Structures are given as structure tokens and as C-alpha cells.
Image: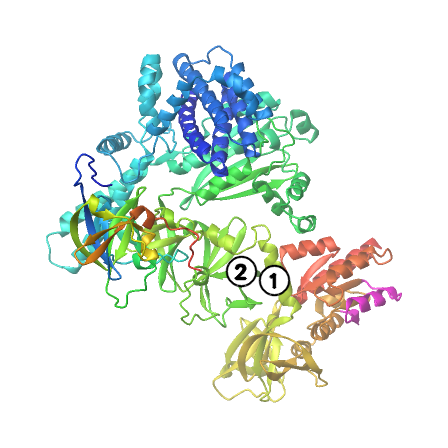
């Protein structure tokens, strides 16, 4: 009998016992969909495994039982009869398994009676299956099953009998003297452990003396026992820490030496207990080669399975939970991912497809990757299915990127397989995979390239018992946030690069050009004590759940600590914000925040999150909120310039300022930087002078001002245009009339050719550009820039005006347009232009204050050739040059 | 729970007595694990009002039930630290916060009466009967019912 079969036997026995249990519970509570799902999955797994091991009798039975249970799932009433029938099927399966264990092969025999009864029941409902039932179902069998159930009642945690404890020690010893060798495959794992063995052992002895090899080669330890041991060790560590603390306070004591020894022993013990829980991931992979081989013959495909890093160790509890998902994903790859040899040859690929499994450690996590070189995900089919299942509307899907669409395969009940096969397609699919991964605080990600294959990456913690967590404070209480989901920490402060901004009362953080939605932990937990929490300051824990990134605002951050996770009391388990609690080194109990729960609380689905952020950004630009640098120069009246135009703010010592060629100069970063003055600004005699530095490529110019006042975020609305050179006009900023200066006026003062250098050379003949922007400020700012670069500029204050200009017969080499405009926005404008035959060849460049991948994608679909940030002058010129150059090439 | 002996009419049950809001309560001693002084109680955000918090009792995490809140009694005025009676339910540990712990009493089961009709409804809900003692009533606490806290009773 091979290892695979051994493992199958022990595992299946356990699964069946669980099914027994669950079924009895289910009969009492037929409306509990959760129990039904559990049973269904268990039977599904049994069926699947039997199929691969070539056990047709078992497979047929399990398949029939599964079909009936599928009916229950679809709403067929659950009757005692039906449950009894399934129970008797399970008894039959056990019977076959017993003989299988004794002889090593499936016994001859037919199960048509049961299978027929099951099919009958599934097709005609409970009433008609009465007669068959009485034949196949002697009453005493049921009784037997029920007694089982009593025996199987799980031990109450903390109710560890002496026997258990003794066994635990015995077994721990065994494990540590012979550390779990990767080759000992039977150290398989299932939470129900030990009980079935105790029950099965005598039977095996009677049936087949050689059969109990299964039990002899390894010793199974109840997870609860290990758990208890672990708790005790944690407690020991805690007590040791307290002792060490006391000993530190009393200088002269003879405890020091023995205490040190106690400390070392404790650490070793802790490590040892941890080790008993660790197993190589290869154990979970063991079945795969066989499965793949069978699949390849069944599906008529040539499949090579590569496995890397099989000796990577992880906690057995984790291993248990990922075993099924892994098998499922490999099956998926073989069934859906890889093409048939003929298709592969046609696509120019080698006939043999490959599935590659790899595992490696990274920090406190293990990364598992399942990749195939098949056809990749079928985006169209996923789209259709997502719409069909009501997961998204067509309009929403249109806006999504491929990666976002691919994520739908993790949605519950999602299966794109057209037909139910014995391999897959019952809707027990990637959602189960994801649920299992979520349960252990892992993340799952899928990447797929059409025609080249897909890969699924799973990131999971090494152990569930001890996790690394960030200890934070909110409203005076401490909380732990699992390090696994923490991406980075940001200290937000007013006036710094990272500050908390508000978009319609929603706090956000601008981080590397992305808007990050923020949640205040204390508000989320409704423990806001009202103590002054500065709205602009705080610590932000940037957290990632799936592909959703958000910031959790906390009052303080302490340190990271390895914490022992303890489940929440059942009375508190309904609180989705916590995944458990833990005892800290100082003895206090704190809650472990569940990032998944917070992500849910954010309200938006994982998929739409990024778009929401983009939308928020768009809204922000619609309101024309611009960061402005406010300063004083020459007069008391404040002046302002868009912050984005300023490269740096410098304080330059007056004695460094020199006069050359009648102009002020300063040596700045190994170069001579000319300084410009505004009217009325004088360079002082000593001290230092604030200077705004504008840089472009390799040169920089400084604007000398008297004082830098503030950086504000304001709606910039130039109300009064100015006739004074260097001033665009006046706007109300922070309640004061402020001059908005025209940088375009000053820069040529420093370098006469500031705007002309390369651009002029490139533009041999004047090209014309239509600039559409509803904001006078931007029209005024960009027009001189474009003119200086050698373009003829025609201005339009809105999209309609732009269309009139385009249709007036004047030819333009390029169109520049704002996105957010009243009436007709930039996207609509672009679509209109694109649909006009005469105009469709003219390149359109979008100008936006917010650039994000989703916005760019949207713009690309609307027909934009390029997407440029409003303040990115070099980028704009470059884009214009490129687009107009293409036109001339094409011409 | 109780040491009922049908042959012997005078079966006795031992009760740990406790006062909550001035009222005397009795808990069957078979249900009581220990009595302790709750220290370093950590509040649990979003939990029901009846849950005072969680604490570490010799390495176990114990959920503390605020019995005054559970009985819908007003909060104690003095901030005197309460005592806690440790009980278990389905393998989980709970601590019932009470005002003061009293003596252990051995009382005959036949002396236990059904809840008097005029018993405060708040108490009647959690009571498994009463004993008439000299000059006062002792309400027998039904521990299982005390621990039935509906999860939807969120502190909104």
C-alpha cells in the first residue's frame, strides 16, 4: 500500500467522522446553510480524492451523495429519511474503506441500491424513496452512527484529561528527538486528529495485522493538546519576564544565575513546542504529482509539474488550511489553464504544459506561487459571468482594468466552467480558496496574461499561534495590528509633505500621488473620547488587504511584538473588527484588530476601492483646490504661486549672494543660479533671504521674496485680472485678497531663453494648438508657456467653444483639454472629437491635476493620445512635440 | 448542578452569595470556579454594554460581565473596585462582576421557591428561584441565562 493511499485512508476516515457529526447537527438545524456548506465541501473533497486514486466505487457513492446534498443546497427540504440515507451511504463508504485498508484494493461489489436511492431522492424528493430506504437502511446502522457522534463530542478546551497531558509530553518528546523529517508523510494533519485513530485502531488490528502501519509510523497529537501546551509555555514566558523584572530591581540577589538558566530553558522549550507544530509544505504537495498525472491522462494534456521549496516549513494548522486550496488551484491550472497539445502547438508553444509550484520564506511569511504557462484567464467569460451573477453592472465593468476583472473569480459561487465535471465546476471554487486564505490572515493575488499563462500568489503567515503585530494606541487603549497587512507607517503632520486632507469630510492622505482613504481607529471602534485629536496630525498605519490599501489613523505607535493569538470569547466573536485577543508582555489583554473587518467597514468593495480614490481625486480637481504657496514680497499684500510650480524653498545667506553682470547670483548646488526680484523686494544686509527656486532640467532660477507665509489648499479663482506685469490677477485666499504671480513673466528674466531652448529648435514651423480649459488661471498660465515653446495658441473657455473653434475650419496640430469642465467634460469632448471624421486625426492631450492609472485608462478609452499633469510643463511640451511630430511623420 | 437526592427530602445546595446593587444573590457553588479581584480590565470596543471587558487571569483570557448592567441596575456610585466570580460555559471563562462577595450558604432545595410575582422583572429574568432567609431574600442566579447575551445588543 503506498503512502498516498495511507494518507488518503486516515484523512478520509476523519472527514467522514466529521460529516457524520455535521449531518446529525444538520438534521436538527436544516436551515443552517453553513453546516450544509461544510458537509458539501467535505464530501466533495472525498469524491475528488477517490477519483484521483482510482477508486471508482467510492467515487460513485460520494458523487451520488454530493448530488443529493447539492439539492439541499438549492433549497430541497431536508428530511430525516434523506439524512439517514446519506448516513447509510457514509457507512457503506466506511465499510469499503475498511476493506481497502486490509487488502490494499477496493473490494468487488455493487452499490447500485444506494446510488439509485440517492438519485431517486435527489430527483423526486423525499416521499418516493421510501421503499428503497427500508431495504438499504437497517435501523441499527443508524443507531451505530449516532453513538459515534456521542463519542466524537469534542473535548472542551481546558478540560484536558491526565491521559491527554501525559500523551502530549510523550509525543512532544518523540517529535523533538526525531525532528519531523520531511520524508515522514503520515504526519498529516487535521483538526479532529487523535480521536479517529483511537477508534480505528482496534478495528484495524482485527481486520488486517499489517494495516496498522498507518498508526505506527507516526503519532498524532490533538491540536488542542499542542495548543494547551503552547498556552502554558506562553504563560511560562510571561512569568519569567516578570521574575526577570523583579530581579533587575534588586541588585544583589542570588536568584540571578538560576533565573538566567530558567530563562534559557524557557526559550528553548518555547522553540521546541513551536517546532512540533511546524511541517514542511511538501506534505501538502504530496498528492499533487499523482493528481496531475491522472488529470493529464483524463484530460488528454501533457503536463509537467515542477515543485520548488518543498522543505519550506510552516505551522501545521496553516498547512491544513491551505492543503485543499492548493490542490484545487493545481487542478484548476490543469483543467482550465493549460491548453490541449494541439492548441498549444497552434499557439507556438511546446506541447507539454507546465505547472510550477514554489514556496519560500519572506520575513514572517511564506509565499506560495502556483503558475502555469497556459492560456491565461478568459477575461470576456469572467466579465459575462460577473454581470450574470449581479456582481457588477456592465458600466462598472467597462471601467475596470483586466486585473480587477480577474479578481471576480474569488467571488462566492463564481465558476466559469460551463459544465459540471468531476474535476470542477460545482461552484466550490476559488471562493473557498479565498475564504481559507482569508481565515488565516493571508492574501491571495492573481496575475494573468492572455496566451501566456496565469499565476496565483498566496502570502500567508508562518504560524497562526504567534504573529508579529504592531502595537498602537487609540483613545488611551492599546491594540495590535497584524504586521502581515501593514505596508508602512506614515507620520502625518500639518505643513509637512504628508498631511491629512479632507475631501468632503472624508479624510485622505496623499501618498506618492495616490489618495489613500483614511479611517480613524477610535472612531471606527466608537471609543472616541473626544480628546483633542488634531485633524491634520497622527500616525497612519498604511494597511493592505487584498488589493485594497487604506490608512488607519491611530494616536500612537509603540513597537512590534510577537503576540500569542487567542480567539475571542464567543460572546464577542460577532465583532468583526477584531480577529482575536492577546496577552502582552506586561500581562494586559489587548484586542487584535482585523484588517479585513476594517476594509469591510470602509464600505466599498475591494474592487472599487481604487476607483473611489480616483473619483475623489477627480472631485478634488473639480473643486479646483490647488496647493498654493503664500508669501510676501515688496508689499504687505500677500502673493501666491501654485506650489507645484515651485521646486524648492531655500533660505540663502545674504553674504552668499553676489552681483554679476548687474544681476544677483548665488552659487547653488555647484551652479550659478540667477536671482530675480519682484518690485520692491530688497536683499537685506545680513541674515538670510527666503528664495523660491524654480528648476527645469539642469538649470534653476530663484525668486527673492521677503517672507514665506503659508502653504494653503484653496479654490483658486482669479477674480480680477491684472494689467501689472508679473501678476496674473487677484484671488481671495484665506480671506485675503492675494496677488497670484505669473512665473512665466519672471523666468525669462533669469534666462532669456527659458522657454525657448530646445522647443524652438524642434518646432521648425509654428504649429497651432487649441487649449480648452474653463479655468482662467490655467489658460493664463499655459498660454505663455505654449507660445514660448513656439506654438500658436487658440484659447477656448469650455468644450463647446472648443468644438466651435475646431469646426470653424482652422486647422490645429493638437488639442489640449482639461478634464473637469462644466457642461461637457474632457472625456465627452474627446469622444465627440473622435467621432468627427474630419477631426479624428488630431491628437488630443488631456490635462489633469490628478494622474492615476485608472484615470489614464479611462482617458485612453475616451480617445486621448496622452495624459499630462497640469503643472508638468516639460511633460506637456514633450507630449506636444511627440504628438505633433507623429502627425508630420504621418503626413 | 445541585446535589438533588430524591430519596432524601432535605437535599442541600451550597451557594456562594454575593451582593449586587444591595440585593443578595446566590450562585450554586458547583458552577463557581473561583473568586478573584479583577485587575487590568481591558474594555472591548463595540461589545454589548453588559460586557465590562476582558482580563488576564493566570494566562487565560476571561470575559468580565458587568452584573449591574446585566441586571439593568444603575452604576455603582462609589468607584470601589468590584469583585468577580469566575464561572465557565462551554470551555470559556467568564467573570461576573459583583459588588461584594458574601459567605457560602448551605440551603435545602425544598426551601427554594419560584420567583414571587412581584420580583423585579430585571431580576426575574435571570433568577432560578428565591430563598427566604432571615429578613431578606436570596435570588438564585441562573448562570446559563446570565451568560446568554444577545450579540446584537451592541452598544450603539
Residue A472 lies, with reference to residue A626, above or below; the image says: above
Asked whether A327 or A889 is in front, the reply is: A327
* Disc 2 with disc 1 on a shared chain: yes
The residue range painted magenta reads: A790-813
Q: In the image as oriented, which residue stretches furthest toward the front?
A: B117
Is label 1 in a helix, a strand or a loop?
A: helix
Dot 1, how many residues are within 10 Å of its Cα: few (below 14), some (14-19), or many (20+)? some
Residue at the spot x=43%, y=22% of the render? A4
Residue at the spot x=68%, y=79% of the render? A718
Q: From the image, tell me which residue sits under label 1.
A: A616
Residue A146 lies, with reference to residue A612, above or below; the image says: above
User: Where does residue B66 sit, x and y in percent of width and height?
Assistant: 31, 57
Residue A741 occupies quadrant: bottom right
Q: Is residue A186 visible?
A: no
User: Where does residue A61 sit, x and y in percent of width and height?
Assistant: 51, 20
Q: Tell which circle, 2 or 1, labels the residue nearer the N-terminal end.
A: 2
| Alpha carbon separation for disc pair 2 and 1 | 9 Å
Residue A843 occupies quadrant: bottom right
Residue A179 lies, with reference to residue A90, above or below; the image says: below
Asked whether A455 or A698 is in front, the reply is: A455
Asked whether B87 or A409 is in front, the reply is: B87
Q: From the image, tell me which residue sits under label 2.
A: A517
Asked whether A495 or A326 is in front, the reply is: A326
Q: Quadrant of the C terminus of chain A?
A: bottom right
Is A417 positioned to the left or the right of A654 in the image? right
Q: In the image as oriented, which residue stretches furthest toward the right?
A: A809
CB-based contact (under 8 Å), mark 2 and mark 1: yes
User: Where does residue A59 sit, x and y in percent of width and height?
Assistant: 52, 20
Chain containing the residue with disc 1: A
Chain containing the residue with disc 2: A
Amino acid at each position: 500500500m503506498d503512502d498516498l493511499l495511507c494518507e488518503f485512508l486516515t484523512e478520509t476516515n476523519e472527514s467522514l467522522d466529521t460529516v457524520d457529526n455535521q449531518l446529525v447537527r444538520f438534521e436538527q438545524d436544516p436551515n443552517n446553510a453553513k453546516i450544509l456548506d461544510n458537509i458539501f465541501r467535505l464530501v466533495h473533497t472525498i469524491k475528488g480524492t477517490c477519483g484521483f486514486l482510482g477508486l471508482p466505487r467510492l467515487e460513485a457513492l460520494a458523487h451520488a451523495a454530493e448530488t443529493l446534498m447539492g439539492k439541499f443546497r438549492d433549497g430541497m427540504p431536508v428530511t430525516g429519511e434523506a439524512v439517514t440515507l446519506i448516513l447509510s451511504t457514509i457507512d457503506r463508504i466506511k465499510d469499503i474503506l475498511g476493506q481497502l485498508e486490509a487488502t490494499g484494493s477496493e473490494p468487488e461489489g455493487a452499490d447500485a441500491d444506494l446510488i439509485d436511492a440517492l438519485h431517486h431522492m435527489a430527483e423526486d424528493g423525499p416521499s418516493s424513496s421510501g421503499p428503497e430506504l427500508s431495504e438499504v437502511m437497517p435501523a441499527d446502522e443508524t443507531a451505530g452512527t449516532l453513538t459515534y457522534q456521542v463519542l466524537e463530542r469534542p473535548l472542551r478546551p481546558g478540560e484536558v484529561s491526565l491521559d491527554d497531558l501525559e500523551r502530549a509530553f510523550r509525543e512532544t518528546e518523540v517529535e523533538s528527538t526525531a525532528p519531523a523529517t520531511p520524508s515522514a508523510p503520515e504526519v498529516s494533519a487535521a483538526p479532529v486528529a487523535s480521536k479517529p485513530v483511537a477508534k480505528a485502531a482496534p478495528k484495524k488490528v482485527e481486520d488486517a495485522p499489517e494495516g496498522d502501519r498507518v498508526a505506527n509510523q507516526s503519532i498524532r497529537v490533538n491540536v488542542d493538546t499542542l495548543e494547551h501546551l503552547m498556552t502554558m509555555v506562553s504563560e511560562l514566558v510571561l512569568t519569567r519576564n516578570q521574575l526577570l523584572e523583579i530581579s533587575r530591581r534588586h541588585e544583589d540577589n542570588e536568584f540571578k544565575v538560576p533565573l538566567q538558566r530558567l530563562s534559557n530553558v524557557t526559550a528553548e522549550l518555547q522553540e521546541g513546542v513551536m517546532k512540533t507544530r511546524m511541517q514542511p509544505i511538501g506534505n501538502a504537495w504530496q498528492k499533487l504529482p499523482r493528481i496531475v498525472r491522472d488529470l493529464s491522462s483524463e484530460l488528454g494534456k501533457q503536463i509537467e509539474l515542477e515543485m520548488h521549496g518543498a522543505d519550506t516549513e510552516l505551522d501545521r494548522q496553516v498547512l491544513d488550511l491551505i492543503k485543499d486550496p492548493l490542490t484545487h488551484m493545481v487542478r484548476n491550472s490543469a483543467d482550465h489553464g493549460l491548453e490541449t497539445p494541439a492548441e498549444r502547438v497552434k499557439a507556438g508553444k511546446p506541447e507539454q504544459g507546465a505547472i510550477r509550484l514554489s514556496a519560500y520564506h519572506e520575513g514572517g511569511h511564506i509565499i506560495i506561487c502556483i503558475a502555469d504557462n497556459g492560456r491565461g484567464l478568459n477575461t470576456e467569460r469572467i466579465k459575462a459571468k460577473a454581470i450574470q451573477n449581479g456582481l457588477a453592472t456592465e458600466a462598472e465593468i467597462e471601467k475596470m482594468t483586466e486585473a480587477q476583472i480577474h479578481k471576480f473569480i474569488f467571488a462566492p459561487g463564481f465558476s466559469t466552467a460551463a459544465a459540471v465535471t468531476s474535476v470542477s465546476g460545482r461552484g466550490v471554487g476559488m471562493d473557498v480558496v479565498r475564504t481559507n486564505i482569508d481565515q488565516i490572515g493571508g492574501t491571495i493575488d492573481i496575475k494573468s496574461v492572455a496566451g501566456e499563462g496565469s499565476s496565483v500568489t498566496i502570502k500567508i503567515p508562518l504560524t497562526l499561534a504567534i504573529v508579529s503585530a504592531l502595537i498602537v494606541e487609540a483613545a488611551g487603549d492599546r491594540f495590535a495590528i497584524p504586521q502581515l497587512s501593514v505596508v508602512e507607517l506614515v507620520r502625518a503632520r500639518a505643513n509637512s509633505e504628508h498631511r491629512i486632507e479632507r475631501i468632503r469630510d472624508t479624510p485622505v492622505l496623499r501618498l506618492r500621488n495616490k489618495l489613500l482613504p483614511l479611517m480613524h481607529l477610535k472612531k471606527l471602534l466608537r471609543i472616541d473620547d473626544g480628546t483633542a485629536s488634531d485633524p491634520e496630525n497622527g500616525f497612519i498605519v498604511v494597511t493592505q488587504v487584498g488589493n485594497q490599501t487604506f490608512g488607519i489613523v491611530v494616536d500612537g505607535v509603540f513597537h512590534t511584538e510577537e503576540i500569542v493569538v487567542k480567539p475571542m470569547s464567543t460572546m464577542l466573536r460577532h465583532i468583526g473588527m477584531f480577529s482575536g485577543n492577546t496577552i502582552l508582555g506586561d500581562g494586559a489583554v489587548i484586542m487584535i484588530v482585523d484588517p479585513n473587518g476594517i476594509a469591510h467597514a470602509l464600505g466599498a468593495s475591494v474592487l472599487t476601492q481604487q476607483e473611489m480614490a480616483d473619483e475623489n481625486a477627480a472631485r478634488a480637481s473639480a473643486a479646483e483646490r490647488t496647493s498654493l504657496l503664500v508669501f510676501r514680497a515688496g508689499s504687505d499684500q500677500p502673493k501666491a504661486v501654485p506650489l507645484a510650480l515651485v521646486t524648492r524653498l531655500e533660505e540663502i545667506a545674504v553674504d552668499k549672494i553676489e552681483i554679476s553682470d548687474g544681476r544677483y547670483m548665488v552659487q547653488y548646488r555647484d551652479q550659478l543660479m540667477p536671482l530675480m526680484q519682484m518690485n520692491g523686494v530688497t536683499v537685506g544686509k545680513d541674515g538670510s533671504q527666503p528664495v523660491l527656486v524654480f528648476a527645469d532640467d539642469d538649470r534653476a532660477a530663484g525668486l527673492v521674496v521677503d517672507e514665506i507665509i503659508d502653504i494653503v489648499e484653496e479654490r483658486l479663482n482669479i477674480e480680477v485680472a491684472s494689467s501689472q506685469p508679473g501678476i496674473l490677477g487677484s484671488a481671495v485666499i484665506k480671506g485675503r485678497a492675494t496677488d497670484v504671480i505669473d512665473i512665466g513673466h519672471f523666468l525669462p528674466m533669469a534666462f532669456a531663453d527659458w522657454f525657448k531652448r530646445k522647443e524652438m529648435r524642434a518646432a521648425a514651423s509654428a504649429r497651432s494648438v487649441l487649449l480648452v480649459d474653463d479655468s482662467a488661471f490655467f489658460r493664463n498660465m499655459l498660454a505663455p508657456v505654449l507660445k514660448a515653446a513656439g506654438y500658436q495658441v487658440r484659447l477656448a473657455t469650455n468644450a463647446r467653444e472648443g468644438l466651435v473653434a475646431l469646426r470653424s475650419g482652422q486647422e490645429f496640430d493638437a488639442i489640449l483639454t482639461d478634464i473637469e469642465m462644466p457642461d461637457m467634460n474632457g472625456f465627452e469632448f474627446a469622444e465627440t472629437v473622435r467621432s468627427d471624421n474630419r477631426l479624428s486625426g488630431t491628437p488630443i492631450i488631456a490635462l489633469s491635476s490628478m494622474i492615476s492609472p485608472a484615470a489614464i485608462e479611462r482617458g485612453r478609452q475616451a480617445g486621448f493620445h496622452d495624459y499630462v499633469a497640469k503643472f508638468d510643463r516639460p511633460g506637456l511640451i514633450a507630449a506636444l512635440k511627440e504628438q505633433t511630430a507623429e502627425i508630420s511623420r504621418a503626413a | 448542578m445541585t446535589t438533588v437526592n430524591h430519596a432524601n427530602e432535605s437535599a442541600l445546595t451550597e451557594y456562594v452569595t454575593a451582593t449586587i446593587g444591595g440585593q443578595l444573590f446566590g450562585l450554586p457553588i458547583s458552577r463557581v470556579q473561583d473568586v478573584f479581584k479583577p485587575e487590568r480590565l481591558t474594555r472591548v470596543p463595540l461589545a454589548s454594554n453588559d460586557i465590562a471587558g476582558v482580563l488576564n487571569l493566570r494566562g487565560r483570557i476571561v470575559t468580565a460581565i458587568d452584573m449591574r448592567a446585566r441586571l439593568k441596575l444603575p452604576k455603582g456610585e462609589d468607584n470601589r473596585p468590584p469583585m468577580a466570580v469566575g464561572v465557565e460555559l462551554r470551555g470559556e471563562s467568564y467573570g461576573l462582576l459583583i459588588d461584594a462577595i458574601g459567605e457560602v450558604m448551605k440551603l435545602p432545595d425544598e426551601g427554594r421557591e419560584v420567583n414571587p410575582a412581584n420580583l423585579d422583572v430585571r431580576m426575574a429574568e435571570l433568577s432560578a428561584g428565591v430563598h427566604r432567609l432571615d429578613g431578606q431574600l436570596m435570588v438564585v442566579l441562573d448562570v446559563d441565562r446570565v451568560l446568554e447575551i444577545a450579540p446584537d445588543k451592541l452598544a450603539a
